[in-house]
Amino acid sequence: MTSNHPIIQERTERTQWFLQDRFGMFIHWGLYAIPARGEWVRSVERISVEDYQTYYDEFDPVRYDPKAWARAAKQAGMKYAVLTAKHHDGFCLFDSALTEYKSTNTRAGRDLVREFIEAFRAEGLKVGLYYSLIDWHHEDYPAYGDRIHPMRDNENYTRNPETFDRYLQYMHGQVRELLTNYGKLDVMWFDFSYDRMKGETWKATELMAMIRSLQPHIIVDNRLDASGEEGGTIFTKNPLSYSGDFASPEQIIPPQGVTDDEGNSLPWEACITLNNNWGYAAQDFQYKSSTTLIRKLIECVSKNGNLLLNVGPNALGEIPKESLDILAEIGNWVQKNGDSIYGCGQAYLPKPEWGRYTQKGNLLYAHLFEESVGPINLNGLAGKVKKARLLSDGSELFLSRPWNAAQYPDDAFISFARPEHSSYPLPDKRATVVELELL
């Protein structure tokens, strides 16, 4: 259903590429890669600015090669990437004129954001920047009494609420820098709102007006308006100007996809970690398998969503080998089966028992996760399939009506070989994709 609400119309236009590309890379990287206990280490361990300074003094990612990162993303089948320009600890990976707390002042002496953007653009990937709305380093950001600030229990860090405006000027100023100093950006990914720290606390109307004036095409997530636990006004028929262009469920794939309160599909993107941390965690080897992640990518697309898959480079600037191996395996599958992902969305049919469907026009893609006893049942598709082929190699599959399926006149059946009633192993255990051309 098309809305004539101007904000919704503009959102629809801006997100066209996003709904086509479907798969992106998230990159969480900063000083926290040195302690290597996750990006929230300052908050979790209540580390003071003074004690955290040692990581700033040490920061020297001598193996940072964004061209290698970009190649890995492209080979994985990713179409865009989002880098943490500033995370909650306040450290900036870019050369901001508004702070000394930045990568150009460390031993690295480099504008790491600029190098990232140039490298990923050179590979033909779209680029986005993550920017934390909160800042545990800035002296005007609420500390004592805040729910998550590292110094939340330390009365010596009591802030004067009247100086919070200075922080907002700083935060808005840095967003302006990112949108004016690095050319065209495709995504602005804000994180995160919580408690009363959301919406107009950030002067969100003013901030979004500035963003739209500088880069009207850019897509923005919904976290200016909403915390991670709630969705905000993007879910309503009257979204606020800062409601964002897409919803951002984190570490979860919504059971029914994401729709507004009238049931219309919304642009959305599940951000998911490869292991259990966003930032580099040296002892976290709980990596999801490539098969799981391939199937989760398919699941997102089958629900009209995107997958933003995270990597956490180490202190030297390297994406861990475990992550690169998984990305390569995903890329091996996407290279053969990407037509069932890019530009695809939810099918008109319900989820089949053996896997999932995605659809693009009259092409229906059957993603088979489970092996069948006998031919594969295509529920409700009798007389509706013109051709069936294995997407990975284009080989013909057999459409048939086996002798033992007389009781299922509404269903079509496909087989990988003859005789059609026999069982055959799936050609790809991760996810075998059959392209069905519908009549």
Image (cartoon, rainbow, N blue to C red):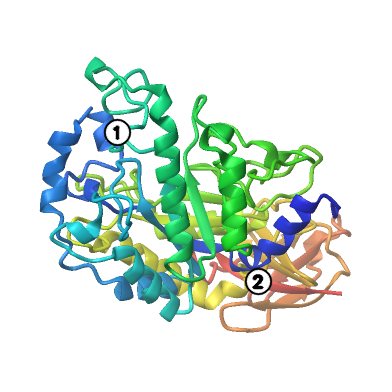
Q: Position of residue 73 (x, y in %)?
A: 41, 69
Crowding around mark 1 (Cα neighbors within 10 Å: few <14, some 14 to 19, many 20+) is some
Dot 1 or dot 2, earlier in sequence: 1
The reply to whether residue 268 is visible in this rendering is no
Q: Position of residue 358 (x, y in %)?
A: 68, 62
Alpha-carbon span between mark 1 and mark 2: 57 Å
Going by the numbered disc 2, the residue's amino acid type is Val
- The local secondary structure at tag 2 comes to strand
Residue occupying the point 59% across, 32% down: 230
Q: Position of residue 370 (x, y in %)?
A: 57, 56
Residue contact between numbered discs 1 and 2, judged by CB atoms under 8 Å: no
The residue indicated by pointer 1 is: 139
Q: Position of residue 27 (x, y in %)?
A: 37, 57
Q: Judge left or right: residue 381 versus residue 281.
A: right
Going by the numbered disc 1, the residue's amino acid type is Glu
- The local secondary structure at tag 1 comes to loop
Residue occupying the point 67% across, 65% down: 366
Q: Judge left or right: residue 79 versus residue 344.
A: left
Kindly report which numbered mark, 1 or 2, lies closer to the viewer in this rendering.
Answer: 1
Looking at the image, which is closer to me, 311 or 12?
12
The residue indicated by pointer 2 is: 434
